[in-house]
Image (tube, helix red, strand yellow):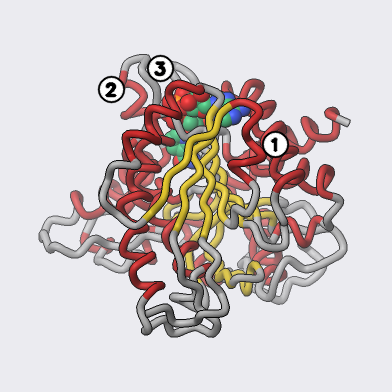
Amino acid sequence: MPHNTQEQEPLKVAVLGAAGGIGQSLSLLLKTWLGPVAAAAAGAAAPAAAPRTGVIKIAMYDVNRDAVRGAAADLSHIDTPVAVSAHAGDDIGDALRGAELVVIPAGVPRRPGMTRDDLFAVNARIVATLADAIAAHCDLSRTFVLLISNPVNSLVPVLQERLVHASGRSPHDVAQRVFGLTQLDAVRASTFLHEAVPQWTPEMPSVPVVGGHSGETIVPLFSLATRAADTITAEARERLVHRVQYGGDEVVEAKNGAGSATLSMAYAAARITCKFADLLLGLVPELHDTLYVRVRVPGQLLAPGAQDLLETLAGITAGGNGAAGTAGTAAGTVAYFSVPITVGTRGIVSVDALPLQRADEFERKALAVCLGQLGGNIKKGQNFVANLG
Ligand code: NAI
């Protein structure tokens, strides 16, 4: 029986770039995993106020018409209560209208020898075009946008700042709803630590990974892992950090020209998308995860905890102790950062700077290196949007 007969709107999830390596695998996982979510929402046990019931729809959009139609037809035969539709070319409005979650894996992937930054010129254009379409067809007071396309460090600024330009909404409002996905780094950190700890257990450790999503901007905080990272040597930890930072290269090289991580990225993206679905369907009141967000919003605080974060980052940049309370020194820290946050249906509820404040000396040095590089990546995205006019 429906829990609340007044609210029967389906939840619509649009995947832009749905015919690609990530897009198809992600759509498969969503078609599968959102089935139980739809069933749970239809049950009577949803704890949050005003839960919604009804079907979940996945709108698959890609510029490759045949590939997206084929993938959607294929997925539509899977026996879960989740509807799938295909959209291509100018049909993007149909894909986006009414969507409360938009996930973007559109763009070109890396080939051997390429950095994520090498993708910028092509993917920034794609993301800016998609931002215009989202601003035209979605209600940004209701829609969350999750960006996968690389380089995330620069393209989240492109998406966020182009959405501000195209929608006329304030930077603060848009910052509440636009997130870069760095989840794959945390998935890798968990897997690699699990492999490295001598005593095997079935539980996978959870490792906070903050900063950005490229090389040394990726900062895994192994000292704060839920499982004995202290049973490994300092050298082993350094190797682990390097492996998380450059784990993507292992896949690019193994694929030898056929692209970058798709299956593991789809898994990481599906996990966080399902958490957003739980939130939007009223199955949970809030979600907690690490997301790449605009932490510095002109004239306004992003959310409670943001000032602590900015001061902590300023302390790290200055080589100080980084604790909160260094008010006024926040100038010079980055505007975007991947950090643990709490999200509610209205946007970001709070930012959690504590893991950065608890990072050990080795990690603080890694954070300083990250901050030294991240600012330039962000500026590149911001300049691109400024020059678009
Ligand atoms: P892919 O080439 O297999 O798929 C990309 C898809 O985007 C294609 O189907 C293409 O037709 C589509 N596309 C291109 N322009 C479009 C537009 N304007 N609108 C809609 N669709 C469009 O690439 P793959 O492997 O799926 O990777 C996608 C992106 O994800 C790449 O930029 C890659 O670097 C990035 N990535 C991000 C990760 C992360 O951790 N955030 C991890 C791995 C990859």
| Quadrant into which the C terminus falls | top right
Q: CA distance from mark 1 to mark 2?
A: 30 Å
Could you say where residue 268 lies in the image, as x and y percent from the top left? 38, 49
Q: CA distance from mark 3 to mark 2?
A: 9 Å
- Element on which disc 2 rests: helix
Residue in front for this viewpoint, 131 or 357 = 131
Q: Residue at x 69, y 54 (%)?
A: 294
Q: Amino acid at mark 3?
A: Pro
Check contact, mark 1 vs mark 2: CB within 8 A. no
Tag shown at residue 376? 1
Q: Which residue is mark 2?
A: 254
- Element on which disc 1 rests: helix
Q: Amino acid at mark 1?
A: Gly
Could you say where residue 19 lies in the image, as x and y percent from the top left? 44, 29
Tag shown at residue 248? none
Could you say where residue 145 lies in the image, as x and y percent from the top left? 61, 51
Of the two numbered discs 1 and 2 in the rendering, the one whose residue sits closer to the viewer: 2
Residue in front for this viewpoint, 162 or 355 = 162
Residue in front for this viewpoint, 82 or 227 = 82
Q: Residue at x 33, y 47 (%)?
A: 29
Task: Reply above or below: 55 against 125.
Answer: below
Of the two numbered discs 3 and 1 in the rendering, the one whose residue sits closer to the viewer: 3
Q: Which residue is mark 3?
A: 112
- Say whether residue 389 is left or right of residue 269: right
